[in-house]
Image (cartoon, rainbow, N blue to C red):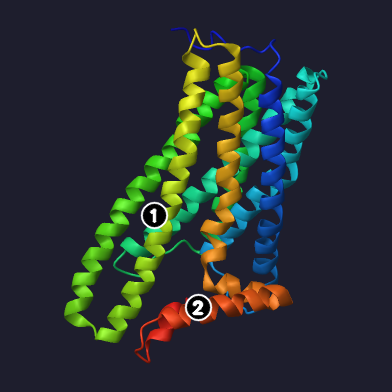
Amino acid sequence: MKFGANLCDEVWAPFSTSVTTACVSAILCVITVPGNLLICWAIIKDPNNELKSSFNYLILNLAIADSFIGLVTEPVFVWYHSSEAMRREVLGLRWLVYMSYFMTSTASVLSIAALATDRYLAVTSTTIRKLSSTSAITASIAIWSFSCSLPFLYFATGFYTLAFIFANTTIILTLILLLFYFVRIVKSLNAHEKHMASVLGQNVQRRGLLREKQATKCFLLILLFFFVCSFPSCVMIYVINLCSTCSCVVIHWCRDLQYLLVLLNSSSNQFLYAWRMNSFRRAFGRIHPFLSSWEAQQRNSAVSQAPSNPADPAIMAE
């Protein structure tokens, strides 16, 4: 089994492969752009003065990365694969597709790792210990510096080797980090639950534990979706680089599907993070009347499902 022995660079992708990739990329573009731009606007404008925190600065960085995916990478994919479907010469512009893909996807994945790190520090520490705003900004700058540098390896290694490096560093290391954080967070919450049961009043205990458990469920959802998208993508990259007997049809489908799985994960980030947080929903409600009505419905639904204890409405607040 020889590395990179059957890459099919000089063979046209099947028409169905190119059309599918172009159509799915166009749909993801429509999903990705509006929500992430709204998140950026909400944090920058901050109409309720409650979004200036290190965690939200990292969410801003993630939203910027995903906005670039929707504004640059996905439209480039639509153009490239539409041209490929019509058998127009596009080989000379592959570098544009690959550079935009690696830059924005790396920034998105590393931003998820930074958010998980902030969450891990907040939950597992015995004292209040989060990334400071300065540290969050520094981390964001470092993420973009690395993300803008990595794609230039393409000119030395080619796409498939760089994809192999990307899978084995950025994606797999982030997945391992998320798994480690999740296990530690669950253990820490169990320990905090036993401690609070012995020293704190019932209302305080219920309020704190419910908030943390809700956040942990959200973290588990993020981990599961990241795994569902990233694991098959990594397997396909291995198939592309190591399968010397696979047909070019299989190689091209693996190439495009591993693209789309990473882009799908980026499109979903907004719904896994900001849109699930009360502070963001309140900010969205102040920005646009339609979103204000939607936020009120969400709030009323949350209140109707909350326990009847007078102190419990505070549980739903952040």
What amino acid type should be assigned to the residue bearing mark 2? Ser
What amino acid type should be assigned to the residue bearing mark 1? Leu
Mark 1 neighbour density, 10 Å: few (under 14) some (14–19) many (20 or more): some
Residue lying furthest left: 198
The answer to whether residue 21 is seen in the rendering is yes
**Residue at the spot 74% in from the left edge and 46% down from the top edge:** 71
Q: How many marks?
A: 2
The CA span between labels 1 and 2 is 23 Å
Quadrant into which the N terminus falls: top left
**Residue at the spot 56% in from the left edge and 24% down from the top edge:** 254
The foreground one among 274 and 116 is 274
- Above or below 68: residue 163: above
State the image quarter where residue 315 is shown: bottom left
Q: Position of residue 243 (x, y in %)?
A: 48, 13
Q: Nearer the viewer, mark 1 or mark 2?
A: 2
Where does label 2 land, which residue?
301
**Residue at the spot 54% in from the left edge and 51% down from the top edge:** 139
Where does label 1 land, which residue?
220
State the image quarter where residue 86 is shown: top right
**Residue at the spot 41% in from the left edge and 65% down from the top edge:** 215
- Above or below 12: residue 166: below
Residue lying furthest front: 16
- Above or below 216: residue 227: above
Element at label 1: helix
Q: Position of residue 82 (x, y in %)?
A: 78, 29
The foreground one among 176 and 284 is 284
